[in-house]
Amino acid sequence: MNRRELMQWFSMGACVGGSSLFPVRDSLAASRGQPQASALKGLPPLKITDIQTILTAPEQIRLVIVKVMTSEPGLYGLGCATFTQRAYVVQTAVDQYLKPFLIGRNPDEIEDIWQSSYVSSYWRNGPVLFNAMSGVDMALWDIKGKRANMPVYQLLGGKCRFAVDLYYHASGRDFQEVEDEVRKAMARGYRYVRAQVNISGESTYGAGSGEQYTEDAERGGPENPKYIWEPLPYVRTIPKLFEHLRVKLGNDVELLHDMHERVPLDHAITLCKELEKYHLYFLEDPLPPEEIEHFRLLRQQTSTPLAMGELFNTRHEYVPLISNRLIDFIRIHLSQVGGLSVARKVAALAEFFGIRTAWHDPGDASPVGHAAALALELATYNCGVHEGHVFSPTVREVFPGTPEVRNGYLYATEAPGLGIDIDEKLAAKFPFPDRPNFDYHWGVTRRRDGTIIRP
Ligand code: GCO
Ligand code: MG
């Protein structure tokens, strides 16, 4: 069907599910008698008929997908509600609480569904509820896009770039391994690479040391610390890593680093200042979210670009950092903050303050979450970079329409809605890992003296 035929088909009132046609209505009469029908331009009224959660782990990462079904046969939306560390709690929030609240509602009312879900438990904010709401929210945008027969980025204002730059994760046990990984990424066309290195003898975040965290890790508590991490060796090593990378690789690659909020303010200031000469694209999470007031001090001391926000839940956390221009990049987990609807408002707020987006998109955002972030990024002027995850061929089979990576860019599929689907039969073949639900990566790393560190 060409575009003209498509427009005729739409003006006749065809619906996305395929078959039903509605008589052309007189728009004036409709707006007097049936305001809703007029606003829908002939599309049939729609109701939410069911909401399901789909749990799957094709890469051993616990993903939570929300599927919102509608009264239109074959029309459904998908959203990402992934919170790997507490997946079953999110499932309960969707199945036991949001589902009964939202069945029968009109899926077109995305903003109202968000606002009413937000107050539906009286106590609001926080992980779990926001993960559940994120899943529903993305699914509703997916439905609206399918209904409009447009990719979601069109509904958000249309493209302001053809694709979005990705950053690749390079980790290694030593500088040489990290350098090799960065070279590999550059050879594959990536222009942005995050570099993390293992600190010998320490439980280093993101360094690919292959350390196995086990169930007995926490048994000893502060009396018997097993996974040790100290700030000083870390703060001394990282500038040397970036010196090595700049000497060996030159300046043609954008380098990033994630501090994962592990050091106190004095060390954060020292490290940010020392890294200035290596011109990072950004330095992520120099401080924990509990210490956002410290950003005022850090900001005045360093020109290293700062990224912050993946652990934020509420507007109370990100507004001061943006409005006081204390960071350069806002990082938000779209599947955690309340979905596309919230992230789009944060992006708009950030634009007024010259702050760019770098949504949190590692492997624990599902391909559906990546597709939603991409839709927003394509239509967001102040988009900086998309956190890249190299999805395995199996994940791509489970999620047909997972956005394609070409030459370091992430491309939209151009299909209506979020442009992505799930093969539920295949997804069921990848149940959550046969390990305890508790993820022992977190809450076990301690200082030498036994003090727990964040995170
Ligand atoms: C990042 C993050 C992640 C988190 C992970 C926690 O910047 O990509 O810090 O790697 O650690 O999402 O589950
Ligand atoms: Mg991070």
Image (cartoon, rainbow, N blue to C red):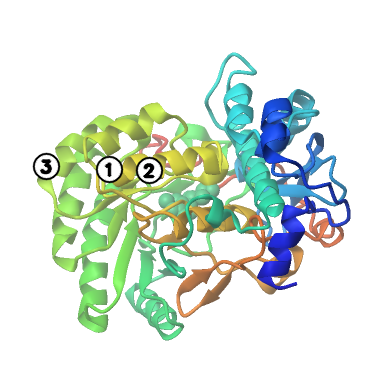
Residue 280 or residue 421, whichever sits in front: 421
Residue 39: which disc?
Answer: none
* Residue 255 image point, x, y percent: 30, 68
Q: Earlier in the sequence, mark 2 or mark 3?
A: 3
* Residue 203 image point, x, y percent: 43, 53
Q: Are marks 1 and 3 in contact (CB under 8 Å)?
A: no
Compared to 131, does 8 lie above or below?
Answer: below
Compared to 248, does 196 lie above or below?
Answer: above
Q: In the drawing, does residue 177 fall left or right of residue 12?
A: left
Q: Secondary structure at mark 3?
A: helix
Q: In the drawing, does residue 154 fall left or right of residue 148?
A: left
Q: CA distance from mark 2 to mark 3?
A: 25 Å
Mark 3: few/some/many CA within 10 Å (<14, 14-19, 20+):
few
| Amino acid type of the residue that numbered disc 3 sits on in the rendered structure | Gln
| Amino acid type of the residue that numbered disc 1 sits on in the rendered structure | Phe
Q: CA distance from mark 2 to mark 1?
A: 7 Å
Q: Secondary structure at mark 2?
A: helix
Q: Which residue is mark 1?
A: 352
Q: Which residue is mark 2?
A: 348
The label nearer to you, 2 versus 3, is 2
Q: Residue at x 42, y 66 (%)?
A: 161
Q: Secondary structure at mark 1?
A: helix
Mark 2: few/some/many CA within 10 Å (<14, 14-19, 20+):
some
Q: Which residue is mark 3?
A: 300
Q: Are marks 2 and 1 in contact (CB under 8 Å)?
A: yes
* Residue 337 image point, x, y percent: 51, 37
Q: In the drawing, does residue 247 fall left or right of residue 127?
A: left
Q: CA distance from mark 1 to mark 3?
A: 21 Å
Q: Is residue 115 visible?
A: yes
Residue 287 or residue 441, whichever sits in front: 287
